[in-house]
Image (cartoon, helix red, strand yellow):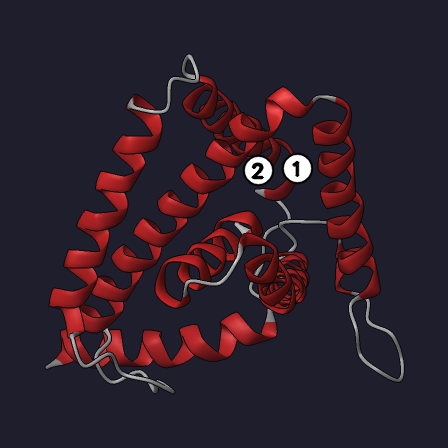
Amino acid sequence: MILNYSSVIFLGFVLMFGVSERTASLLSIPATYATAFGFIFSYGKLLVAMAGSRLLPRLLRVRQTKTHAPYWSLILGSVVGYGLCLLIYYQPTIGAKLFNVCILSAFVAYTAQCVGYIMLSTKYKNLPREFRSPLGVYGAVYSMFVWLLASVSIVGFQKDDGFAISVFVGMCIFFSIFYHVYSKNRQTFSEEERKILFVAHVINCKHYLD
C-alpha cells in the first residue's frame, strides 16, 4: 500500500508538473514516510482492540505507563513487517506477488466496511457518529461495487498463477482455525465495544417494541 500511494504521487508530479523523475522521487519521500507511520498507528490500534476482545493474547493490549503507547502491539507489527521486507529483499521476484495479496486483502476489507456502513445506516440510524457521509448508503453501494470489481482485477488479470487468491484463501483458513481453536472460547467485549453495542442494543430493543 505504501508503494501504491507513493507511486501515485510520483506519477502525479511527473505528468501534471513536468518535473524530472529524480525530483519527483525526492518530493514523494515525505508522503511515503507519512503513510508508513499512518499504517503503524493503525495496526497498533487494531491489535490493541483485538487483544481487548481476547481475540489475541492480552499482552498486546499492554501500554507504556507515560505515553500509553501499546508497545507490544507495535513491536509485533514491526517484526512482521520487517520480516516481509527481508523476504522481498532476498527473494525480489515475490515482491509483486505479495503486493497483490496485500491489495486484495485491502479491497476485501474495504468491501466489508461498506457492508458494515450499510447495516449501521439502515438498522442503527440513531447511533452517534463523528461524521456522516453526504452520499449515504448509495455511496457505500457504489464503493462496494468498485472494490469488488477491483478484487476481480487482482484475482483474474494479474498473471500471477493464482498466487494472490491462493494465499488470501490460505490466510482465511488459517485465521478461521486460529479463531475456533484459540479465540472463540475466550472472546469477550472490550470496553469500547461494550459502550457502542449497549447503545445499539437499546436502539434495537426500542425498534422491536415500537
Query: Where residue 89 sits in the image (x, y, percent)?
Result: 75, 30
User: Are there few (<14), some (14-19), or many (20+) residues within 10 Å of tag 2?
Assistant: some
Question: In the rendered structure, are the residues bearing label 1 and label 2 in contact, judged by CB atoms less than 8 Å apart?
Answer: yes
Query: Observer-nearest residue: 190 or 2?
Result: 2
Residue 160 placement: quadrant: top left
Q: Is residue 90 above or below residue 195?
A: above
Horizontal side of residue 16 vs 8, given as left or right: left
Residue drawn 80% across and 79% down? Answer: 68
Query: Observer-nearest residue: 188 or 107?
Result: 107
- Residue tagged 2: 179
- Residue tagged 1: 182
Q: CA distance from mark 1 to mark 2?
A: 5 Å
* Amino acid type, callout 1: Tyr
Horizontal side of residue 59 vs 170, given as left or right: right
Q: Is residue 76 above or below residue 165?
A: below
Residue 51 placement: quadrant: bottom right
Dot 2 falls on a residue whose secondary structure is helix
Residue drawn 72% across and 44% down? Answer: 81
User: Image quadrant for the C terminus?
Assistant: bottom left
Residue drawn 59% across and 67% down? Answer: 27
